[in-house]
Image (cartoon, rainbow, N blue to C red):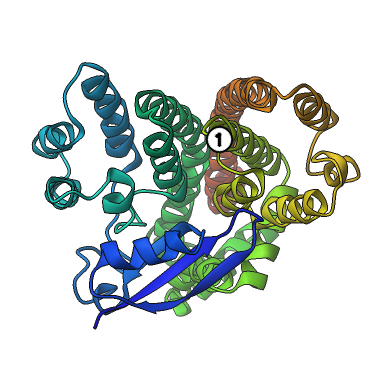
Amino acid sequence: MPKFRYQAVDNQGHYYKGVLEAATFQSATDELKGKGLWILDCFDQGKSILHREITFGGPKVKMEHFTVFCRQLSTLYKSGVNMVESVRILSEQTESKVFKKILKEVAEDMQRGTQLSVASAQFPTVFSTVFVNMIRAGEASGNLDDMLDRLAVFYEKEHYTKEKVKSAMIYPIIMGVVTIAVVTLMMTFVIPRYVENFKSMGLELPLPTRIVIKMSDLLKSYWFFIPIFVIAPSFIIQAMKRSKKGNYYWDYFRLKIPVFGKLAHKQSIARFSRTFSSLYAAAIPMLQAMTIVSNVVGNEVIGKLILESREGLRSGRALADPFKDSWLFPPMVVQMLAIGEKTGALDSMLEKVADFYEADVDTMADRLKSLLEPLMILLLSGIVGGIVLAVMLPTFKLMGGIH
């Protein structure tokens, strides 16, 4: 009998994970729901590597493809097209071959009577916990069209914010790679030729020139360290992120990076607010919503504080209390949480916070990009110009001697 690995929470926010034997995926999810659990992840562990299409951990779909799918699914369903047919139409329309195959499988499962939330939960690397739980809530309440619209808005906002941050980050990365490439080429091919000429003339070289020549010799002798120097940080970061503790320290470090840390912090607050607002509006139990948000907020440090708030809420404290003494949540967010909790309008309050921080991230990313472009150009020009000047100094000295 197949074994299904699952992660789930109950209405009190308690977290469960384990392995369940069941004849089918539907049977496994029915058994978990019969125990009063909300499923965060469930998959056949026998298929976790051997039968999943892409890389490790399951198939991946680009955010832009998934965002378009959510909006089109909402539009088709609101237009009166039944859910099975809507998913089948979108499976033919998507540009992603992986997503096409997954949507066809989802449509086939739904044709056999499986609900969309159950069918999509089989692909946790494609359909997030937020998606599955909001669809499940919409199916249970009969308000699926509203949930689909909320999901479409949620992923559109999320995608737009991510693209803004990515556009701000990619320019310094590209310029850094170009700088390393240019300096390496100059040090290994250009400078040695000049050095040979200077040596043949018997010139006494100035200190800057001697330093550059020494650097060139080191680079030629130990050139194989360059790829290691470029690639090693990525491997170190990935190794850290594999453990819970390492991931926590990495996320803490990210928040403390000048300028970029502030941008990442605001993006996480925006994601927290948007996700929590969507889950609360879907009438998902508060404790369970907080568990989900802590997993999808994108930062272990903030996620840990959310879990602490969940425990405080369980013991009778107000939702905003644990956030008051933390630097992670600005006073405005804490006040909006407190007001929303008192008035029963938590979803609308959090939606306003999300709108504010998404706009703030947008503005900050644009400013950062406009500032970084000239700064990186100046940095590249300074490094290359300094090397060229150091190499040319003996030539200037030689020309002065001729006069």
Q: Nearer the viewer, residue 195 or 119?
A: 119
Q: Position of residue 306 (x, y in %)?
A: 72, 50
Q: Residue at x 67, y 35 (%)?
A: 266
Tell me which residue sits at (55%, 41%) in the image.
Answer: 284
Q: Secondary structure at mark 1?
A: loop
Residue 95, position in %: x, y?
A: 15, 38
For badge 1, the amino acid type reads Ala
Residue 318 screen position, x and y as percent: 84, 40
Residue 185 to residue 20: above or below: above
Direction from residue 2 to residue 39 in the image, left or right? right
Q: What residue is disc 1 on?
A: 283
On the picture, is 113 further left or further right than 188?
left
Q: 177 or 18: nearer the eye? A: 18
> Foreground: 128 or 381?
128
313 relative position to 51: left or right:
right
* Residue for point 23% across, 50% down: 114
Q: How many marks?
A: 1
Determine the residue positioned at 11% across, 38% down.
88
Q: Name the residue furthest top.
A: 79
Q: Nearer the viewer, residue 63 or 277?
A: 277
Quadrant where the C terminus sits is top right
Residue 192 seen from this side: no
Residue at far front of view: 34
Badge 1 density bin: few <14, some 14–19, many ≥20, Cα 10 Å: few
Residue 144: where, in percent of width, then height? 36, 29
Does 37 sit above or below residue 168?
Answer: below
| 315 in relation to 115, above or below | below
Say which quadrant the N terminus sits in. bottom left
Residue 262, by quadrant, is top right
Can residue 303 be seen here? The reply is yes
Q: Quarter-wise, where is residue 66 in the image?
A: top left
